[in-house]
Amino acid sequence: MEEFTAYGQAVLEFVNRVFDLCSMYRAKVFASIVAPDAPRPSGDFLRKDYAYLFERFFYYLEDTPADEMGIVVFDELEKAQCRILIDQMERYFMQTAHGKARSARIVPEPFFVHSDLTTAVQLADIVAYSLNWGLRLNRMIKPTRDEIVPFGQRAFDLRYIGQRPNETDGKTWPVYGITYIEDLRPKAERDSI
């Protein structure tokens, strides 16, 4: 039993150190937290959670020097799922106005890696787990795990926060790198019901 306790304490200390390093190097977190029962789109196009991430990632890149480009890295899925996602991203970046504009700063084709072999994806896994079990935003009602709440807050504190001008009145409005999404369908599909 003492060995399990020691292991658990070491894991907690490791995760604390990971968040210390992320903070020290000013890492930014982007996340779409999706409700477990969120309605899914019926079409074969990019889901709302991905579109949201690309939008906020693009805003972040706009805050960096003009020659900076962003790459999208995913944990490898089954090949058929990877192909579907690649096709959806291609349509988004090549056939939509927002996607075309954002492809100026985001490489429109993702990289797929194995998380067990890629440190940066393992870091993303730690952040995702911490947000999933240790953070609740408005309208999120599922319980947290008490021991993960401090990590959820640390991940939340790393979120991207930017500002964008409102096109109608010129005032600036905040944009955040983390959001909660209750419905993955596009507006047209939601409105047709």
Image: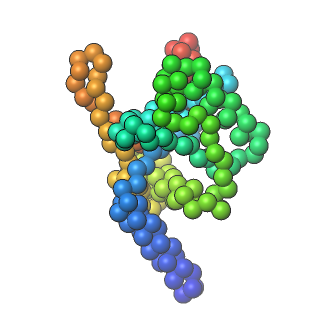
Q: Position of residue 13 (x, y in %)?
A: 44, 74
Q: Is residue 8 left or right of residue 81?
A: left
Q: Is residue 141 left or right of residue 49?
A: left
Q: Position of residue 37 (x, y in %)?
A: 57, 36
- Name the residue: 75% across, 45% down: 78
- For the N terminus, the quadrant is bottom right
- In the figure, 59 relative to 74: above or below? above
- Name the residue: 27% across, 30% down: 173
- Name the residue: 32% across, 39% down: 162
Asked if residue 183 can be seen in this view, the reply is no
Image quadrant where residue 179 sits = top left
Q: Position of residue 18 (x, y in %)?
A: 45, 66
Image quadrant where residue 41 sits = top right
- Name the residue: 49% across, 30% down: 104
Q: Is residue 183 left or right of residue 140?
A: right
Asked if residue 17 can be seen in this view, the reply is yes
- In the figure, 129 relative to 169: above or below? below
